Amino acid sequence: MKRFYKEATIGPADGGHAILLDGRPVRTPGRGLLALPCHELAEAVAGEWQAQGETIRPDAMPLTRLANTVIDQLPAKRPDALVEIAGYAASDLLCYRVARPAEFAERQHAMWQPWLDWAAEQLDAPLLTTNTLEPMPQPQRSLDALARAAAALDDWRLIGLHATTRLTGSIVLGLAMTEGKLTAEPAFTAAMLEELYEIEQWGLEAEQAKRHATLRAEIAAAVLYCRVLREGE
């Protein structure tokens, strides 16, 4: 779509801050009003619209996409989002390790175990690890604790957790990012640890580099989204 406006700003809306294009409110794909719950997030979303060139590129507006998801799909699909997020707790990336090679096993422990320890201490959700590919049953009280942590979030923050969890394959990493304990680049490294180790051995292929760049950008956007929401509290 060709850019049709000169200036993106924010203005007051019921209970929030609307995005305005030359003074006119933006609508979501579902025709809802694009209004954000805090000034900080509204400024960031308006910045995405202002940064567009002659052609509007939705793929270059990740914060807008997340906001559209909240407005168009929640709270109706909140139960589905909670179920999906909770599903990661039963098979969290951080719980599945290797025994060999020893160098990589040590790297997994060094990178992943501190976050499992954090979940145990801060969320009362200790998770078990395994060196096999067989599913590892987790303590029900830990699964319940992680589900409660997700359910305690409002719709805006829940979408942030949904994004960070889905992108990394770990509800533990997702919660750490949502709470501001983990930044984007370490999160990418933790999520892609096995591939990054293999790249050290065999080199980086062009398709991998492209996929990694996309994932890096998506994680960075999700972390930014969570951060500006916290700043607006």
Image: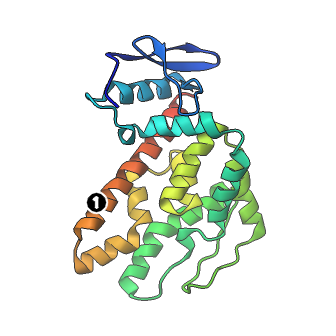
Quarter assignment of residue 105? bottom left
Residue 152 left/right relative to 218: right
Judge whether 144 appears above or below 52 on screen: below
- From this viewpoint, which residue is outermost toward the front? 1
Q: Residues within 10 Å of mark 1 (few under 14, many from 20)?
A: few
Residue 65 location (% of width, % of height): 48, 39
Query: Does residue 34 appear in this view?
Result: yes
Residue located at (61% from left, 71% from top) = 91
Residue 208 location (% of width, % of height): 29, 67
Judge whether 45 appears above or below 170 on screen: above
Viewer-proximal residue, 162 or 72?
A: 72
Residue located at (44% from left, 67% from top) = 111
Callout 1 secondary element: helix
Q: Three-letter amino acid code at disc 1?
A: Lys
- From this viewpoint, which residue is outermost toward the bottom? 100
Quadrant (top left/top right/bottom left/bottom right) for the C terminus: top right
Quadrant (top left/top right/bottom left/bottom right) for the N terminus: top left
Quarter assignment of residue 216? bottom left
Residue 213 location (% of width, % of height): 31, 56
Residue located at (53% from left, 35% from top) = 67
**Pointer 1: what residue?**
210
Viewer-proximal residue, 4 or 59?
A: 4
